[in-house]
């Protein structure tokens, strides 16, 4: 069976499932925004870096004036202790912002003890923020199952989606050194998905989606962009181009799901 892609790219900022509008939007640049995350027994430096960047991006959105609201959601976490996975279910408060990070640059990063004596990973970024006024369509959603937060290298990536309504899908992998359009591809053509039906990925039996790491641990981001109309991605597959592509789609026309994936080479 042919391998479609080997994901070897590492550690990029957490991609926020957000909304942006190409019809009613404003662009702002914010600079020197800090994010911080504690390194602990359960959080590696690689994970702490990714979380710190994600926190900095959230702060950049606030600094730019993005409207936000707080909603309760159930998030599934996994942690590894004594080589056994423990499932931890927590109810957390998530912030959904009416804005989008269309591009960012890490200008500084370091590990240091914070004011409480904890070892922390700190990052500072400059970011371009797109603000918009239109709202998401709550009925246009897609349920995703089977994506884990941790994989051993090399391992197959298999998952399912069930859209609430008909639409079209782009799937991206984002990393520091390499990003790509995972679906559609030369083996799997674009198709219109029907609401209420379950679809398994990969769509073709002629290939596998494989994730792998060259050394130690890598963090990558899987992003599913589900849209009401067919919107092909035609630019070079860089993280900046992909994020700008997603940002420039009206929020009422899309649903975005994003997942950070830790890949361990053992």
Image (cartoon, helix red, strand yellow):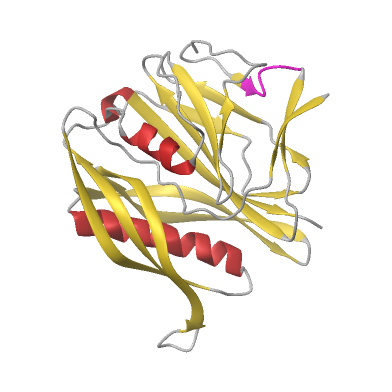
Q: What residue is drawn where x is 40% and y is 27%? A: 141
Residue 53 is at least partly visible in this image: yes
Q: Is residue 156 above or below residue 252?
A: below
Residue 266 horizontal side relative to residue 106, left or right:
right
Image: 17 above or below 150: above
Residue 174 percent location from the top left of the image: 54, 43
In this view, the residue in front, 101 or 133, is: 101
Relative side of 106 to 174, left or right: left
Residue sitting at x 21%, y 59%: 63
Magenta residue check for 203: yes
Q: Residue 217, how many percent across, how many down?
A: 69, 59
Q: Residue at x 68, y 32 (%)?
A: 158
When the figure is inspected, residue 231 is found, relative to residue 16, above or below; the finding is above
Per the picture, the main secondary structure of the magenta-coloured stretch is loop
Quadrant (top left, top right, bottom left, bottom right) of the C terminus: bottom right
**In the image shown, does 220 or 28 lie closer to the viewer?**
28
Q: Nearer the viewer, residue 83 or 106?
A: 106
Magenta segment range? 200-205
Residue 83 left/right relative to 50 = right
Compared to residue 59, the image places residue 97 above or below, namely above
- Does residue 122 show up? no
Residue 98: quarter of image: top left
Q: Quadrant of residue 102?
A: top left
* Residue located at (32% from left, 60% from top): 126
């Amino acid at each position: 069976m042919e391998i479609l892609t080997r994901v070897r790219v590492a550690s990029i900022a957490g991609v926020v499932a957000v909304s942006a509008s190409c019809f009613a939007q404003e662009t702002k640049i914010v600079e020197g925004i800090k994010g911080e995350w504690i390194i602990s027994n359960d959080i590696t430096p690689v994970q702490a870096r990714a979380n710190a960047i994600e926190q900095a991006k959230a702060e950049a959105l606030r600094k730019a004036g993005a409207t936000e609201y707080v909603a309760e959601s159930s998030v599934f976490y996994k942690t590894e202790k004594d080589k056994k996975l423990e499932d931890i279910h927590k109810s957390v408060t998530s912030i959904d912002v009416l804005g989008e990070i269309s591009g960012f640059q890490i200008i500084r990063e370091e590990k240091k003890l914070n004011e409480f004596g904890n070892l922390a990973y700190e990052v500072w970024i400059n970011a371009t923020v797109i603000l918009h006024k239109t709202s998401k369509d709550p009925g246009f959603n897609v349920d995703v199952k089977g994506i884990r937060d941790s994989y051993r290298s090399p391992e197959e990536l298999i998952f399912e989606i069930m859209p609430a309504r008909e639409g079209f899908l782009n799937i991206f992998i984002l990393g520091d050194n390499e990003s790509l359009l995972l679906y559609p591809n030369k083996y799997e053509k674009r198709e219109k998905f029907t609401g209420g039906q379950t679809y398994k990925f990969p769509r073709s039996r002629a290939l596998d989606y494989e994730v792998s790491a060259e050394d130690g641990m890598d963090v990558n981001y899987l992003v599913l962009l589900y849209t009401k109309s067919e919107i092909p991605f035609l630019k070079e597959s860089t993280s900046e181009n992909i994020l700008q592509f997603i940002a420039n789609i009206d929020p009422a026309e899309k649903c975005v799901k994003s997942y950070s994936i830790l890949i361990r080479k053992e």
